[in-house]
Amino acid sequence: MNTKEKFLSQFAFSNAMRGYVGIERERFLKNAAGLYVPRAKKFLSEVKDSHWTHELSACQVEDRTDPRNNTLELKYDLVRNTNNGIYAAQNIGAEIITEEVASFHVPLDVFPLERYKNIVQTITKDRLRSACRVAGIHIHMGVGSIDEAIRVHNVCNAYRNKLIHMGDHSSGERIALYKEMAPQWSSPHYENVEHFFETATIEGFSESPKQCYHLVRISVHGTVECRMFGVTPHEDEIIYWVEFLKKIIGGV
Amino acid sequence: MNARANEKEMRNSFRKTVTQIIKEKERFVKKREDTMVGLESEIGVFGFDKSESEIMSVRDAVVGRVGNKDADVELGAFQLELRTPPISIFSGNGISTLEEKYVDITKIATQEAKKHSLSVLRCGTNPFVRIHNTPRTKKEKYTQVPNFQNIHRRKFTDVHIGINGTSVDIGDASIVSLFQSFQVNMGACSLHDAITLMNYAFMIGPYLIGIGGNSRYLESTDTGINDLRILAWEISHDTRVVCDVVQGKKTRIGLPERYFLGVEDYFNRVSRYPFILYNPESATQIGIGLHWLDTRMKIIGNAAVVEFRILPTQPHIADEISFALAFIGRLLHATQTHEELLPFELVKENRLCALLYGTRSLVWIKDGGLLKRMPLSEAVEIEIVRATNGLLGIGIDEGKRLKEFISRYKKNSPSEILASVLNRKKHPEREEMWNALVSTQMMQ
């Protein structure tokens, strides 16, 4: 297996998952006094729900929908996860908060995971602060092959500014901080598979595609992931984004 | 006059009338034992051997035979509505009287349809009729309202429905003419009581629709959904602009954003949406008539009436009576015990889960003062005990009937039974569908 083949083998494209959508939704934890609390670990042990997981900041948690090929079940997953999260947070004396940009003074505690500890060691405090301050919603669209991934990626990338605008609830602050956190945020238009591999090699994510922080990226889950959306408490707004994405990519 | 001016006039007229209603709130006050209950049910008439216009004339003949007092046409050219007059169920034989009347008019309608070689469809959706450009009853309102919804539907709305790998295009608002519901109208003791009952009904509705789902098939396609009627209505009638969606505003179908705080709050919500039709003298009826919530409050003369609309027509009218008793008893229990409402976010989840997954749902319920999540089949048993107690509180003992009813229904909703008879085929043939409907008594 040559290096390009090795790189591509990390992506789990599946024809069976074409047209499926998955959503990741980040939120902050605050206590009754309205202060951010680094209690993600405690929250996860309380919620006991595999749809919930950690983020780099210990003041953040993230829930995920199952991959769905229809918007009704996506919406149900979003509502169900939120309710589970609300009650788990209550039980630990906290609240889950939908906030696109946290205060400058958010604690910089990192979730206790080796991978996160390593990241912290390689970035500046300012970048860490930016990472800890932003919460977003990531939408994954399942694709069947690398060729299809490149096509869908390029369509979403062409609409990037429009999508940023649609998902912005912080007058651009979240995206500004995201760009600070991930200097290589700008996703290029991929000419072909070779160009994708070349970009990965130059930008240093060929061995670990998870380290690609482009606003639109081809993810190892066999999806094209749009990471530009901010957060909203309204499930219908998220579904609207999904519907818009489906429309522009032409019903994959 | 242009449409904008008409809307303004309708809104002004609506506000004027509801202000008067609120001012005269005393005229709606009555004792519980003086309130009435009425039932409404939409049924279809259908047969393969007749043309669309022939079916429509039989439908009109059925309405004529039952009588305009107890029957009326509906949006769909193949449907009609049957309704009992308001009857007091609190007096000695009230429930029997209601039941007898309901059985009687249903029997007349069924016999008349059969006389013309048509069958009666007792199902929440008509699986044989096309969705796009489906035949509608020729009335101005039945043209204007669906056309308005089609023109103003939000761009990019995904108008497909199906959760089992199928996908049916429901992008025509007249899809509603394929839907049939069973509705309970319960008189309230006051305007305030009507709002209280309506809020309780939002909370209770999901448990009942979970077991009572009976609209799963469209255009002979299995959508996999326990009850798609209101979900398809919401999608096909979503005329919100993007700004509304971003602000968390909902459509006028299904659930509102939250529980209602009072009668003004309710009327304010009704007046937020376009009236579409122009008739200032009937602005209140039109506004409320187009506010298709799972439960809504209507004003009829000196009565404030709560209309429970989430259930589809059931295969057996005896079961519809049981649903009506469960609903009324459960509301009575809630008022008798001053029950605390379930948080609205949980109602939203319960409802969506029950509509999608029926008896396989996991739902939230308050039990013994604790908030619990449990299988719907267990939750409805608790609900039925509460309903039984609510009825006992006014001296009506229907425990045996409700117990027998729930022991059958909690296992599978009618739509689950139909899917099982059809071996879960995604696209059953027309004849297979017909036979399955006959064998489940959804086609009579």
Image (tube, grey):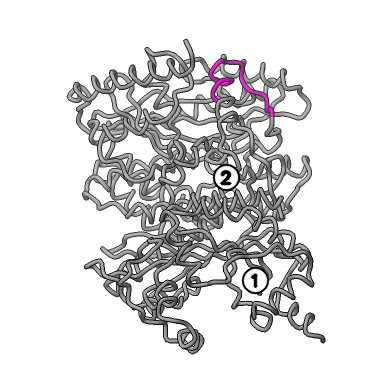
Considering depth in this image, is A249 or B45 the residue closer to the camera?
A249
The quarter holding residue A21 reads: bottom right
A190 sits left or right of A239 in the view: right
Viewer-nearest of discs 2 and 1? 1
Q: Position of residue B113 (x, y in %)?
A: 65, 23
Q: Residue at x 57, y 27 (%)?
A: B146
Given residues A124 and B346, the one toward you in this image is A124
Residue at which label 1 appears: A219
Q: Is residue B60 above or below residue B356?
A: above
Q: CA distance from mark 2 to mark 1?
A: 34 Å
For the C terminus of chain B, the quadrant is: top right
Residue in the image at 70% along x and 64% along y: A17
Question: Mark 2 sits on what residue?
Answer: B228
Residue B429 x, y percent position in the rendering: 79, 44
Q: At x 69% / y 48%, what residue is drawn?
A: B167
Q: Is residue B144 above or below residue B352?
A: above
Tag 2, which secondary structure?
Answer: loop
Discs 2, 1 touching: Cβ within 8 Å: no
Vertical side of A92 occupied by B39: above or below: above
Circle 1 sits in a helix, a strand or a loop, which is it?
Answer: strand
Which amino acid type is marked by label 2? Leu
